[in-house]
Amino acid sequence: MTREEAERMLTEWAEVTASRDERVRAAVAAGLSKHRVHVLTGIGRTTIDRILAAPPSGSASEGHDA
């Protein structure tokens, strides 16, 4: 693997993982069980629980300190 290939591979990975939480929420909303999301992605069940419990990014409460 060349340096350029490695950089491209990591850039692609970063782009996909940046939307991880949104993709997990969408999958569960579409009817996939948390267990199935875990099996398909390898994301830990506790991490999936945290993703689902957190407000979606871009929500009105994000970035506002009391």
Image (spheres, grey):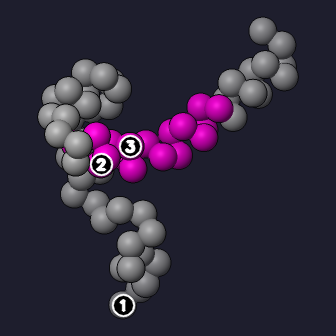
Furthest toward the front, the residue is 30
- Residue designated by label 2: 25
Q: Amino acid at mark 3?
A: Arg
Residue closest to the eye, 66 or 9: 9
Query: Residue 41, position in %: x, y?
Result: 35, 26
Q: Residue at x 24, y 52 (%)?
A: 52
Residue 9: image quadrant is top right
Up-down relation of residue 38 to residue 55 (above or below): above
Q: Amino acid at mark 2?
A: Arg
* Chain part drawn in magenta: 12-28
Residue density around tag 1, few if under 14, some if 14–19, many if 20 or more, within 10 Å: few
Secondary structure under the numbered disc 3 in the rendered image = helix
User: Which quadrant, please, contains the N terminus?
Assistant: top right
Do labels 3 and 1 touch, CB within 8 Å?
Answer: no
Do labels 3 and 2 touch, CB within 8 Å?
Answer: yes
- Residue designated by label 1: 66
Is residue 50 on the magenta stretch?
Answer: no
Q: Residue at x 28, y 60 (%)?
A: 54
Secondary structure under the numbered disc 2 in the rendered image = helix
Left or right of 59 on screen, residue 52: left
Residue closest to the eye, 25 or 6: 25
Mark with earlier residue (1, 2): 2
Mark with earlier residue (3, 1): 3
Say the numbered circle drawn on residue 23.
3
Q: Amino acid at mark 1?
A: Ala
Residue density around tag 2, few if under 14, some if 14–19, many if 20 or more, within 10 Å: some
Up-down relation of residue 1 to residue 47 (above or below): above
Residue 47 visible in rendering? no
Rounded to the nearest angstrom, the CA distance separating label 3 from label 1 is 29 Å
